[in-house]
Amino acid sequence: MEYYTLDGIEYWKYYIMLLYYRFAEMPPVVRVVAIFTTLCIIAIVLLVIGNLHKSLKEERRVRRIQSYDRRFKEKIIELATTQELMDVNTISEELGLPKNFRMKTKTTGSMIPILINVQRNHKAEINRPNWQRILQAFKVPAYFEMMMRSRKTQLRIKALKNISDMDADLKEAVASRYLFSKDKKMMMNARFHVARFGTSYPFKALEEDNDLLFTNEMMVNFHNILQYRHDNNMSMPNLIRWCNRQPVNEELRIFAVNEIRLFKRYDDCPELLAMLKDCRDEQFACALIKALGELEYIPAESEFRHRYAMASFAERQALADALGVINSGNPEVVNYLTYDYESSTDHVSKMKALRVLYNYGRRGRDAFNKLKAEASPANAPLFEHIECNLLDSSKYA
Amino acid sequence: MPDGIQNFFNYAVIIYSALLVSSYIAMVILAYQQHKRHKTYHYEKNTIDQLRTSPYTPGVSIVAPAYNEEKTIINNVNSLLSLDYPDYEVVIVNDGSKDDTLKLLVETFQLVKVPYAYVEKIKTKPVRGVYKTSSDNAAFKRLTVVDKENGGTKADASNAGVNIVSNKYFVCTDVDCIIDKYALYRVVWPTMTSSRKVIAVSASMRMSNGCDVRKGQMVEPRPPHSLIPLFQDLEYTRSYLVGKQALSAINAMQNVSGGFGFFDTEIVIKAGGYDGDSFAEDMDMVARMIRYMCDSGEDYRVVQIPETCCWTEGPSTIKVLARQRTRWGRGLLQFFIVHRDMVFNKTYRQYGFVTLPYILLFEMLAPLIEFTGYIMLLYLIITGGVNYKTVWLTFFGLYCFAQALTLTIISYDIYTGNSFRKRRSYLWFMLASLLEPFLYHPLNVFYSLRGYVKHIFGAKMVWGNMTRKGFQQQPGTEAEAAQPVPAAEEAEIQEIEE
């Protein structure tokens, strides 16, 4: 018998054939499982390599940011907070940037987190014109415009978030084309951008979208936007129009009423009261009652008392709170709150009525003491709870 | 052994293994999509900035039961009081501690007993008193201490805390856990972005053994350098970054951990709170919340977020691990018996059609199947009926798959930004992954089976304390350095066989 020593390609051919025949001998189930597992392992390994590659890239980016941070941060803070107005060339010179500084994705991209940090930590002291020129010196607007032209939604959203984070003065047009994008996140971020920086009527898209589902995140964002516009003396939307919008969007109406309350729009109170008179929706009614209460609109008191008989649990809570905030000293309110305490069957409502009575001037305190004297042993702890100044009963659940 | 049985077993095991591997693959893909979506749309600093100043940010209460925690309670409460969130309160429930836990709290935080009108929305052991601070310190004002008679379970103490919380949401945690400073922003955010009602949010938890902890805050997460906590850390990471992320993607989360779980207060109360008789009270709570939502026809979501929000101390000895795993095994069986009517019940949607069958097939039956496999292999070795080629091929394939899975977890961990500061720390994970199938996994199989047996034969389990070594806290100042380091606290779950 002759023996051959295989080498090179022959060896590998033989080895692969051997594997194939061994494999072919196995039961079909084992073969299927083996193929499947092998493919899966390959897929996972590729995934791992991809992720590790991304992580290494991210690590390099972080190192680059750190080096820029050491080089530019102090100077940027100094230039942004100085009261002296500077032009772009002077700022570039001060920062040590070359005369014909061209925007490079890596350089400008790495500057973004540093600029956001400066904006976040020195918001109050920043001289806005200088700040915009610093951004121009680093070609930040051009960078964002380039990102907004990107095919990747992720990059566009990131750009919009960054623009708002660093208060970059960028044309609203860069985002207007995405106001009705199919990607909901993209659409909302574009709307946030236009609402924040827009000059003509920035809330148009919001008002025209009949199917809009208004989440808490949107409330948070839109409130911040309105606050920004308010602080920068920019035009504010007509919130009452949002309340009367057709077709009705309940969440948007409630949000609008809350914003009227938060921005102390006293002039809108008569209209809010008129809405309350016709209101049948519990949540909207609660928002209206809370707004009228916090805006201390005394004419609403009689409507509050009138509403009590048909009010739900949540509405009664809101009514008691609102009357407590208005605190007009009206004896009828004291009677109403006493009745509220006596007719309530749950501890939470009783506590609420008692808390308002306790803080409702001399008349309220007298009524509280009278009720305390007549209280049953089961209700006595409620009075002690209210009288204890260490307990914040406004949050009694 | 008849050939028929042998063939049936062979094919059953192969099909089962294939299903298990397929389920892992599906989960890896789903989890990747979740991580990617999270990375694309979530900007943490932006979120924190917005929530910090917004009037729409919901209030959160933190409920932390404490039982005989005098050695660590002050550090831990201080840590809870120093979180970053605009509107939160901390409710510590002293569950009838026999040591000076309450006394220390009263002295340190200047607490006085207040006439709180306590309403028992969920039945618990009697509450002896409620304490609030008389100090002007603003942080202390967030603290409420509830002193109650010992209920024997964490569930009873948690329920007492739930009865007193005043916010729309609450976080249930253990008093000895270290919570990330920004954890509350992270768990609140899903409730703000979802168009459906979010009833619970789970965040990743890791082992604190070996980490650098100062003043109750995590300074540098490190992998544990002893084997049992290291295995557990790997197991937790795998579960949170792959399993739970994937199930969260299809709204089929099975569990929100008792160590750190965020819940909707109203739904928890309506679902009846934690069940004091359950050995898997966290899993049971989520099941009952889902049952409540589905029975009332309401839409809901249970969300898993990838960020690590909490570090807990894992068992460091085999004895404690054995007790923990036996209890978990027992809890799993008990849970399944209680909620068996939800399986393949269309009322319970994904929970009935995906979550519960998955738990049954791959979590509850797995130890039984594995144990039968060990017996079968032994029998075949003795009788000489082993096809060693097939055995090695199968073993090698599965072993490679397990290692690939660990690599995936590591890459996910780095991708989501939870990474250890030093990349070489992941070598510990790789070490654990190489050893896990030989050292850790068989132990878990055995303890789970022991739990099943104990439950079937009705052995009574009485809850006591858990053995803790205490965090190796690095003192922040010289004055603190002079203070004694908490000594090892030794007390364990006592099991009484009846």
Image (cartoon, coloured by chain):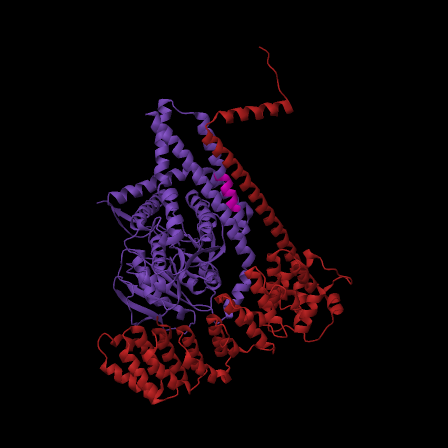
**Chain in red colour:** A
Number of numbered discs on residues: 0
Is residue B407 covered in magenta?
yes
User: Is residue A232 visible to the viewer in this orientation of the structure?
Assistant: yes
Image vertical order of residue B140 relative to residue A273, above or below: above
- What letter labels the chain drawn in purple? B
- Front position in the image: A60 or B103: A60
Residue drawn at point x = 33 percent, y = 83 percent: A357
Residue farthest to the right, as pictured: A99
What segment is highlighted magenta in the picture?
Answer: B402-410
Indicate the position of residue A100 as horizontal and vertical percent values.
Answer: 78, 62
Q: Quadrant of residue A127?
A: bottom right
Q: Which quadrant, please, contains the C terminus of chain A?
A: bottom left
Q: Position of residue B498 (x, y in %)?
A: 21, 45
Q: Is residue A122 visible?
A: no
Residue A339 vs residue B480: left or right?
Answer: left
Among the 4 quarters of the image, the one containing residue A18: top right
